[in-house]
Amino acid sequence: MTKYLLYTFIAFSLYSCKQSLSESKISQPYDTSEAEIDTLVAEKKEAVIPVLDTGLYDQKMAYLSHDTITSKWPPKTAYPLPGAILPFNRVIAYYGNLYTSGMGILGQKPSEDMLAKLQSEVEYWNKADITTKAIPALHYIAVTAQKSPGKGGKYRLRMPDTQIDKVLELSNSIDAITILDVQVGHSTLQAEIPELEKYLSMPDIHLGIDPEWAMNTGHVPGKKIGSMNADDINYCIAYLADLVKKNNLPPKILVVHRFTKGMVTEYKKIKTCPEVQIVMSMDGFGFPAKKVNSYKNAITNEPVQFSGFKLFYKNDVQSSPHRLMSAKEILSLHPRPIYIQYQ
């Protein structure tokens, strides 16, 4: 991802050099005409400035919709900026928190074992769908909802930078992207997300938000399923888009967890933009038929941009047929999920 910034800098430097040579009209110590300089600059700019392949993008979006066009899929959204991860790659993410084994696979195994298992899942998906490269991600809960009010009475706990830095080290060790997840409790996105700005300003770090734990009704987290509306999600989109513009970054991914319609309201008002790629991810657990039904209701029937699907190593196997859904089953969903998360 950092190559994008380097390419842009080189292109800008070449352009500035050309302008200086053209405007100053000073004699050059080389036998090079202005036309030759223009040609050189054009060739260099063409070589280093990334360009979105819109034809390939359309082809990949059609593939996710099983090469059929309906009134809902693929959604009509703006093309992303160059450097976009989706839909050219499928993100395979491990979810959790390093402090506890109860929140997902990310905190259940020693780091070396966890990373090895994640890489085996990436390979599994690369074999299951040879048309789309699978890449690893660590989806880390950086703000966790709490059952007690804690200091400030916000029913949430912010992770220290030392823990986030540890996750970044783990991600870097396997060339993975990182997604920082926020469970606001009684707080707000407006209060929590700016606290992560130094991380979100980095090119390989993205954002996740979880409406389940947004207790705008005043309930204790976990006692009732929370919700967010389009304004909440649009705030995140605008915030990330601004960071992309200010820091000359490739597009950010925003993952929104959802397994009921009530978790996200007014979805039609969610505003897409070239700087942010929005994934609505079905994160309900249970037997396959239940998960498929949740996916249809919360994702297929209410399209935004991209779709995701969560698998639970423990909760999904408690009921018959006591197994995780296969890649083949998941790829048969409409649309095909481009983001897969394991908990």
Image: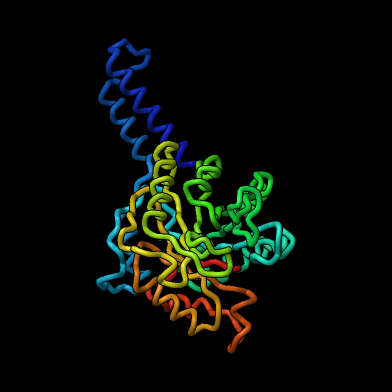
- For the point 38% across and 75% down, the residue is 334
Question: Is residue 189 or residue 154 the one in the foreground?
Answer: 154
Q: Does the rendering let one see residue 240?
A: yes
Vertical relation: 106 (above or below) 2:
below
List the single residue furthest toward the bottom.
320
**Residue drawn at (58%, 63%), measured in percent from left and top?**
220
Q: Nearer the viewer, residue 80 or 192?
A: 192
Query: Which quarter of the figure has residue 76?
Result: bottom left
Q: Residue at x 43, y 64 (%)?
A: 280
> Residue most toward the top?
27
| Spot occupied by residue 30 in the image (x, y as percentages of width and height) | 36, 16
Residue 318 position within the rendered picture, expressed as x and y whole percent measured from the top left: 63, 83
| Along the viewing direction, whichever of 224 and 21 lies nearer the viewer | 224
Image-based side of 108 in relation to 326, left or right: right
Where is residue 201? Give x, y as percent: 50, 41
Q: Is residue 65 above or below residue 207?
A: below
Q: Is residue 179 visible?
A: no
Point 65% across, 49% down: residue: 151
Q: Is residue 186 above or below residue 67?
A: above
Disc count in the image?
A: 0
Quadrant, the C terminus = bottom right
Colour scheme shown: rainbow
Residue 26: x and y in percent read 31, 10
Residue with the most extreme right position = 110
